[in-house]
Amino acid sequence: MSKANIGLTGLAVMGQNLVLNMERNGYTVAVHNRTTQKMRDFVAAHPGKRLVACESLADFVAALERPRKLMIMVQAGPSVDNVIAQLLPLLEPGDLIIDGGNSYFLDTERRAKELAAKGFRFIGTGVSGGEEGALKGPSIMPGGEPEAYDLVKDIFVAISAKAEGEPCVTLIGPRGAGHYVKTAHNGIEYGDMALIAETYDIMHRALGISNDELGDIFAEWNQGELLSYLIEITAAIFKKRDPETGKHLVDLIVDEAGQKGTGKWTSQNALDIGVPIPTINAALEARLLSANRVERIPASRVLTGPTSRYTGDKQKLISALRDALYMAKICSYAQGMALLRAAGKEYGYQMDYGKIAAIWRGGCIIRAQFLNRITDAFRRNPDLPNLMLDEGFKEDVLKRQDALRFIVRTATDLGIPALAFMSALGYFDAYRTDRLPANLTQAQRDYFGAHTYRRLDKEGWFHTEWI
Ligand code: 6PG
């Protein structure tokens, strides 16, 4: 039998779907799984496909054409190191290992350096779009050396989603750059999801809008500038009924948000490299606050808030929410892209932000028409310091800020938590303010800690004996 073009070990659904995507695109794929029976069942379920069943890692390696290309789709963390350690004795210098899990980018940095020192090639790649994306076309964010990427580029281009006819894959940069961008993607994803959740909460609590009408509103918004995967699935979610009870399923789901950790990594790293991403952080905090349901329920009985109802015009609030959601999304993406710029400098990634936005236009969870505009903004000015300063986006935020302020006021007056909306407005107002109250902060720091301060009227650093 001819050798397989590529191998994949780790046959959870993402791994299986990537294999089927590769096979559908004409490649012969060697498949392996730690639990052999799962591999056997998978191959048996797909008779006639160009799959090579491999019972052991030795069989797996032997099945591959040289230089070998082996993709690992196992849980991020020590499992990746374990699989690599088992593979290395079986491989030859020049072989390529690809980690397609949601690995922490500094782990990828370490692995890239360790493997390069031993003569092996390594790609750490984000794969976004969930199980459906893996099967039909994900957005792929590989990081590694160009000659390593060249070995797998054709396969990734073939299996990736396409947007405007362009493949949603590009070599992001060296070593951990790909996994870094995937992590930032997930942070931005958290921001999008939090803003949509707050939009729903305000419509539901301020206007008493039903789930079916919510579904209609989101479906309508998905025809315009908010066109995106997350808005599309949100519309569908509000229409979904639970087959057992006939009730809307969304009303039966416990309001505690989980998180596997990639969004948290975004916030942690942004703090490490000193980049303000308040909306992404707020999204994370909102998940953490929701998870604290055990305290929220008794607290809701004692910490009473406003009892007023929204008495304004319904359509005014709904269209203001649409505009506020779009503006807050711009603020959140401005934060995410600013983080990528800072990370590029910090870690030496030399990333093309227009290309990154371009490969997010399809396949990934944050895919949206909106990303075409971000792509254009960075193609117009690759050194754009902040997305809000792009001519088009500047007009958008200036035109929509009244709507965002109205929504923040309304949520505040009604006692509806809107951490993501409020942080987006705060970011916009702080970023555009030429004199912030940090002068007082500096004075306080110098008063109690003699940490010194600079002055507007003369050069140098000063300390004052305040007492
Ligand atoms: C993607 C998703 C995916 C994400 C999981 C869990 O890009 O396909 O972002 O990678 O990690 O859906 O996400 P949570 O962090 O919310 O658990």
Image (cartoon, rainbow, N blue to C red):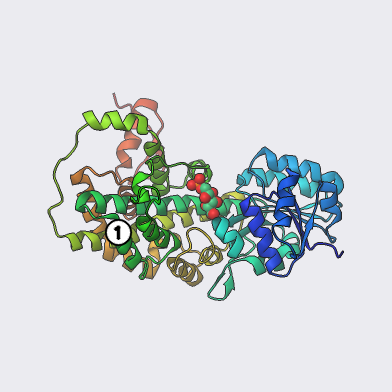
Q: Secondary structure at mark 1?
A: helix
* Outermost top residue: 467
For this rendering, which residue is in front, 296 or 98?
296
Q: So how many labels did they put on this image? A: 1
Q: Which amino acid type is shown beneath numbered disc 1?
A: Asp
Q: Compared to 289, does 236 lie above or below? A: below
For this rendering, which residue is in front, 10 or 226?
10
Whether residue 184 is visible, yes or no, is no
Q: Position of residue 228 (x, y in %)?
A: 43, 64
The quadrant the C terminus occupies is: top left
**Residue density around tag 1, few if under 14, some if 14–19, many if 20 or more, within 10 Å:** some
* Outermost front residue: 244
Q: Position of residue 281 (x, y in %)?
A: 42, 44
Q: Compared to 455, does 221 lie above or below? A: below
92 vs 85, left or right, is: right
The quadrant the N terminus occupies is: bottom right
For this rendering, which residue is in front, 219 or 318?
219
Label 1 CB sits under 8 Å from any ligand 1 atom? no
Q: Which residue is mark 1?
A: 212
Q: Quadrant of residue 156?
A: bottom right
Q: Compared to 282, does 344 lie above or below? A: below
Whether residue 375 is visible, yes or no, is yes
Residue at x-position 31% and y-position 53%: 200
349 vs 243, left or right, is: right
Q: Quadrant of residue 234?
A: bottom left
Q: Position of residue 265 (x, y in %)?
A: 52, 43
Q: Position of residue 241 (x, y in %)?
A: 37, 54
Residue at x-position 66% and y-position 69%: 158
Q: Compared to 384, does 269 lie above or below? A: above
